Image (spheres, coloured by chain):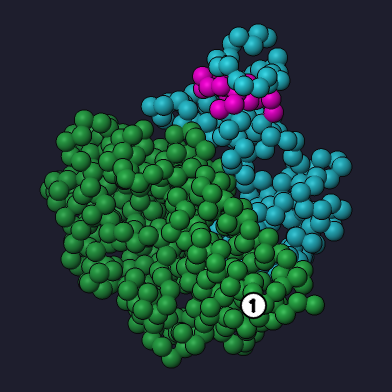
């Protein structure tokens, strides 16, 4: 596909541009249209659309970035600029199940460190790594608003609270 | 997790324990959407703003700015569209009240936003929810559709001339977006950098149009203010801090949870030691951070036997602040050096990088904490931390810098023994 589809203004550095632009099925395009309709300025839809691209493609990959630039009539760098600011936007492949252990004070007081090290040991990876089969990634994250039910982790978008090592076993073993 | 009202009839928490509390039917059977009906039937926008002013409702997100006054700053004659934006970015460590309001009673937020939109002449409104709370965005989406189907949202609401839309919007993991101007940058599709004030959002906010940004708990207080009248609502609390307030309680307490208390509840000690069930494992209380992590930490002896009143003025007199009302309770086993390091890492991670004092300062603070932790502490490090905080406090572009400095300043000054033992070196 031609790069001319994208409205790129001259940049000081040459940027490697993917030839491929992501495509999505009609129902996903319709979902994107619904988000765009909410705002008088299309750029406002950038975060909701990034989540859709991530959901559909696993992460915000270069063809996904090109798609957003085209759909929102922005430069590639505009997309990068926003994507690199937000911790929930992933520009690298990530495990099918992203375990995000809250490490902030209330969870720390009630044993977050133990939950993290237990997950790491069970999965055989360190914080920031993904298992070789691509199923699990382990991260430590800042406060997820679950302080009264600490310690906790979020797997993808699901909250798991009042964790114990037994409960961690139960949750991780139940995932396909 | 406990959800209870103490010292008052539950107001904001009135419906949270009902079965199907998030459904439109249950909301309506329990007084829901009566306030917007009263507003549309018999009140002008100015009447609404005056009632909110009389209520002495203050912003529940953390800053405590009088809500009615904030609303009155929006210019009535502006030809631009106006916006009401709900700040549901709840990210302050120790704070989780908005989550339960949205999870259990989403229509209360919709009704509050409708009333605010009517008072300010806003046609399009957004609920900016942190990305991690995706399940709440889904719950709000269902509630908005229910409201629309019942003629409570969209064109000609309840058969009147009032038309109004509310949309959900998602953040994507950035504490700074809880700061109202950073939230607006993010909602415009930018990095979440704060903006220079003035102009304040009331004059130039979303898309450079007049905008009011209010916290979830602030907006959900509005329907009751309208129903009972501003003066009656104010009388539930104190003269300057009207109504009731939700407090999130976490850490070493036997009954962590969300509690609704009248503003001016007279004893913080009783609240922690009795209402919240006291300290776990029968240990002694050591410290409390009462307003979310960004406020001064309090020693147990500033609380026990001191009758600290729980409202904006009372907590300042007691040596801290209401902030977002997130109590983090710590027992005698906690090393305040370690707990402060934990929070400093939070602020370093969440500093948006826009201004130098905050970006560089929080980074250096973490470096110093790590050096001390590894045994490289020097006696002069306590003063070094304070000097660094002085160079951040009041010198950063937005309040995140102050929020990073205050926990450290108060911890070093109020728990010197916990720092000194790390500063002897090897």
Chain A's colour? cyan
Residue at 39% over, 44% down: B196
Q: Is residue B139 visible?
A: no
Report the chain holding disc 1: B
- The magenta region covers A61-78
Image side of residue B384 versus residue B118, left or right = right
Which residue is under mark 1? B419
Residue A75 belongs to magenta span: yes
Residue at 47% over, 28% down: A43
Residue at 85% over, 58% down: A121
Q: Main secondary structure of the magenta part?
A: helix
Q: Which of the two residues, B302 or B20, is positioned nearer the viewer here?
A: B302
Q: Can residue B286 be seen in this view?
A: yes
Residue B272 belongs to magenta span: no
Chain B's colour? green
For label 1, the SS is: helix
């Amino acid at each position: 596909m031609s790069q001319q589809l994208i409205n790129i203004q001259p940049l000081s550095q040459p940027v490697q541009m993917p030839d491929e632009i992501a495509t999505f099925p009609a129902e996903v395009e319709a979902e994107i249209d619904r988000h765009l309709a909410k705002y008088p300025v299309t750029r406002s839809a950038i975060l909701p659309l990034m989540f859709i691209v991530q959901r559909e493609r696993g992460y915000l990959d270069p063809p996904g970035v090109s798609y957003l630039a085209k759909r929102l009539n922005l430069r590639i760098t505009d997309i990068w600029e926003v994507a690199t600011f937000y911790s929930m936007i992933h520009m690298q492949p990530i495990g099918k199940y992203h375990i995000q252990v809250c490490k902030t004070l209330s969870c720390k007081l009630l044993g977050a460190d133990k939950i993290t090290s237990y997950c790491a040991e069970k999965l055989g990876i360190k914080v920031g790594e993904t298992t070789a089969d691509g199923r699990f990634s382990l991260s430590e994250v800042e406060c997820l608003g679950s302080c009264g039910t600490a310690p906790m982790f979020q797997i993808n978008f699901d909250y798991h609270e009042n964790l114990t090592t037994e409960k961690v076993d139960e949750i991780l073993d139940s995932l396909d | 997790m406990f959800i209870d009202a103490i010292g008052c009839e539950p107001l904001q928490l009135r419906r949270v324990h009902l079965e199907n509390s998030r459904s439109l039917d249950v909301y309506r059977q329990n007084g829901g959407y009566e306030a917007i009906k009263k507003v549309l039937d018999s009140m002008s926008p100015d009447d609404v703003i005056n009632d909110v002013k009389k209520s002495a409702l203050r912003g529940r997100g953390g800053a405590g700015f009088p809500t009615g006054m904030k609303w009155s700053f929006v210019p009535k004659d502006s030809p631009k569209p106006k916006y009401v934006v709900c700040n549901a970015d709840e990210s302050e460590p120790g704070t989780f009240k908005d989550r339960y309001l949205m999870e259990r009673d989403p229509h209360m937020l919709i009704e509050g936003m409708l009333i605010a939109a009517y008072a300010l002449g806003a046609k399009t409104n957004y609920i900016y929810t942190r990305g991690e709370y995706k399940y709440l965005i889904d719950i709000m989406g269902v509630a908005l559709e229910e409201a629309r189907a019942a003629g409570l949202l969209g064109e000609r609401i309840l058969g009147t001339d009032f038309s109004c839309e509310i949309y959900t919007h998602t953040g994507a993991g950035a504490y700074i977006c809880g700061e109202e101007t950073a939230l607006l940058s993010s909602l415009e599709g930018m990095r979440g950098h704060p903006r220079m004030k003035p102009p304040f959002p009331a004059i130039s906010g979303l898309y450079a149009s007049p905008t009011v940004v209010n916290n979830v708990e602030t907006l959900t207080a509005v329907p009751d203010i309208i129903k009972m009248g501003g003066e009656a609502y104010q009388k539930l609390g104190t003269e300057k801090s009207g109504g009731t307030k939700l407090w999130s309680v976490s850490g070493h307490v036997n009954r962590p949870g969300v509690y609704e208390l009248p503003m001016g509840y007279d004893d913080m000690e009783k609240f922690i030691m009795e209402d919240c069930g006291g300290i776990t494992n029968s240990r002694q209380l050591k410290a409390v951070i009462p307003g979310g992590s960004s406020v001064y930490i309090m020693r147990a002896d500033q609380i026990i036997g001191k009758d600290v009143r729980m409202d904006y003025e009372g907590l300042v007199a007691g040596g801290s602040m209401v902030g977002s009302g997130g109590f983090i309770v710590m027992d005698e086993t906690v090393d305040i050096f370690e707990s402060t390091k934990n929070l400093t890492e939070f602020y370093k991670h969440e500093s948006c990088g826009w201004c130098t004092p905050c970006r560089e300062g929080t980074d250096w603070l973490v470096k110093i904490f790590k050096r001390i932790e590894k045994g490289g502490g020097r006696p002069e490090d306590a003063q070094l931390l304070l000097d660094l905080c002085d160079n951040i406090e009041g010198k950063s572009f937005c309040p995140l810098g102050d929020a990073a400095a205050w926990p450290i300043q108060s911890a070093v000054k109020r728990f010197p023994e916990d720092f000194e033992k790390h500063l002897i070196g090897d």
